[in-house]
Amino acid sequence: MDQVVLSEPIGTIGYLDPEIEKSKGVTCKSDIYAFGVVLFEILCGRRAYIRNDANRLLAPLVMQHYENDTVARYNPS
């Protein structure tokens, strides 16, 4: 069941799902997005938002590397 709750978006920069701005609604997927950002913070050792950085938001930076196939992969061998 995928319910949407319509409300004003409230949250911390860097953790807000970009879909919230488009739909003006929050779903359980919004929480999953924020949790994913936290996981990438842990994996990358970088904050989700850096004020004076060209790549200030972590999530779009990760998506860019994923799309360009420049994400380092674990190779156990």
Image (spheres, rainbow, N blue to C red):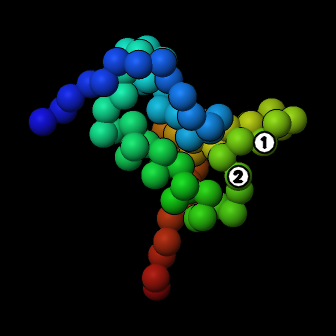
Q: Please provide percent x and percent y for residue 6.
A: 34, 18
Residue lying at 82% horizontally and 36% vertically, measured from the top left? 51
Q: Please provide percent x and percent y for residue 75.
A: 48, 75
Kindly indicate the quadrant of the structure image that contains residue 3.
Answer: top left
Which amino acid is tagged 1? Answer: Ile
| Mark 2 surroundings within 10 Å by alpha-carbon count, few (fewer than 14), some (14 through 19), many (20 or more) | some
Q: Looking at the image, which is closer to me, 48 or 24?
A: 24
59 horizontally vs 53: left or right: left
Location of the N terminus by quadrant is top left
Q: Looking at the image, which is closer to me, 16 or 43?
A: 16
Residue lying at 54% horizontally and 28% vertically, measured from the top left? 10
Which amino acid is tagged 2? Answer: Arg
Would you place residue 73 above or below residue 34 in this image? below
Q: State whether residue 25 appears in this view.
A: yes
- Tags 2 and 1 touching, CB below 8 Å: yes
> Residue at label 2?
47
